[in-house]
Image: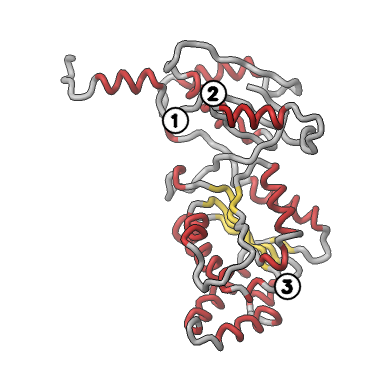
Amino acid sequence: MAAKTAATAVSSFTAPSSSSSSDWKYGVFLSFRGEDTRNNFTGHLYKALDQKGIDTFMDDKKLKTSEEISPTLVTAIRRSRCSIIVLSENYASSKWCLEELVEILECRRTKNQRVVPIFYNVDPSHVRYQTRSFGEALSKHEKNLKIKEKVLTWRKALTQVANLSGLHSLNKPEAQLIEEIMVDISKDLKCVPSTDTQLLVGVNSCIRELESLLCLESTDVLMVGIWGMGGIGKTTLARAIYEKNSDKFEGCCFLANDDKAIELFNHYAFRNDSPSRDVIELIYSAIAYAQGLPLALEVLGSSLCEKNKDE
């Protein structure tokens, strides 16, 4: 394992008790009005999330002509641990944004999804009571008979999201706002031991022994190799240690033993010009990739299939 080296863009996050951790694919879903913030605030926020090691869904389609959001977006919302809604001046003019908002709030209700509204150059009261640009946009939507019945749902959603605890951009530098967002959501988006790891018999003593070798409180960069025959649980142990300690670092990922993973590690770890080299930390924690029980136990278990207790 090595620490304090480089950046990457993938993490695993704790899930609420009502959902399995396997339900989550993304740490954050970004809902925003492209023409307002794609090339400034939201673009910078996405970069900050990426450098933090938070897997973030940001729709890259600039033009949306359909009145219904795509199944891809619905799936991304439902499989995100947290949604950040950038409520900018023209947010309500987009039917897509409003449909995203309704879906996000439904996931908050049914999946305990964390929702963070960002009032970007707008007053929360304009969102809550649909005045100014928000009122004008909804009035235009109401003239479209095809979606007129949806407007009431959108109004309720805007009122609801405006009543949530959020962050404001008024009279605040963008960099400061982004830093506040990162601090706010990082409390919820922390890597935790998976259910499989928690159920592994005897893994805790192995974790403690290996952690003592890692000297996690040290400022030095360390690498510890785990050697042994295939299938005895080297990767499972490495993953368990990664999941237990990754939230102590600014950025982290679990790399698989394939060419792409090694290429990624080398790309970040040994670039002298990496802008985040001094501030982003990486736990390089595995030689191979596996989920659940060690291979040896899986093979042994399969050999016992359909055998009686004595056998």
Ranked by sequence position, the earlier of labels 3 and 2 is 3
Secondary structure under badge 2?
A: helix
- Three-letter amino acid code at disc 1? Gln
Identify which residue, 87 or 126, lies in the foreground: 87
Q: Position of residue 115 (x, y in %)?
A: 58, 58
Q: Label 2 neighbourhood size at 10 Å, few (<14), some (14-19), many (20+)?
A: many
Left or right: 110 as drawn, with respect to 304: right
Res. 36 image quadrant: bottom right
Give the residue at x 66% y 37%: 8
Mark seen at residue 238:
2
Residue 269 lies, with reference to residue 21, above or below; the image says above
The residues tagged by marks 1 and 3 sit, at their Cα atoms, a distance apart of 47 Å
Q: Which-is-in-front pick, marks 1 and 3?
A: 1
Give the residue at x 60% y 19%: 211
The residues tagged by marks 2 and 1 sit, at their Cα atoms, a distance apart of 11 Å
Decide: marks 2, 1 in contact (CB < 8 A)?
A: no
- Three-letter amino acid code at disc 2? Ala
Q: Which residue is mark 3?
A: 123
Q: Label 3 neighbourhood size at 10 Å, few (<14), some (14-19), many (20+)?
A: some
Residue 225 lies, with reference to residue 25, above or below; the image says above
Decide: marks 3, 2 in contact (CB < 8 A)?
A: no
- Three-letter amino acid code at disc 3? Asp
Left or right: 221 as drawn, with respect to 11: right
Give the residue at x 51% y 55%: 76
Residue 53 lies, with reference to residue 80, above or below; the image says above
Query: Residue most toward the top?
Result: 228
Identify which residue, 228 or 83, lies in the foreground: 228
Q: Which residue is mark 1?
A: 291
Q: Position of residue 31 (x, y in %)?
A: 61, 62
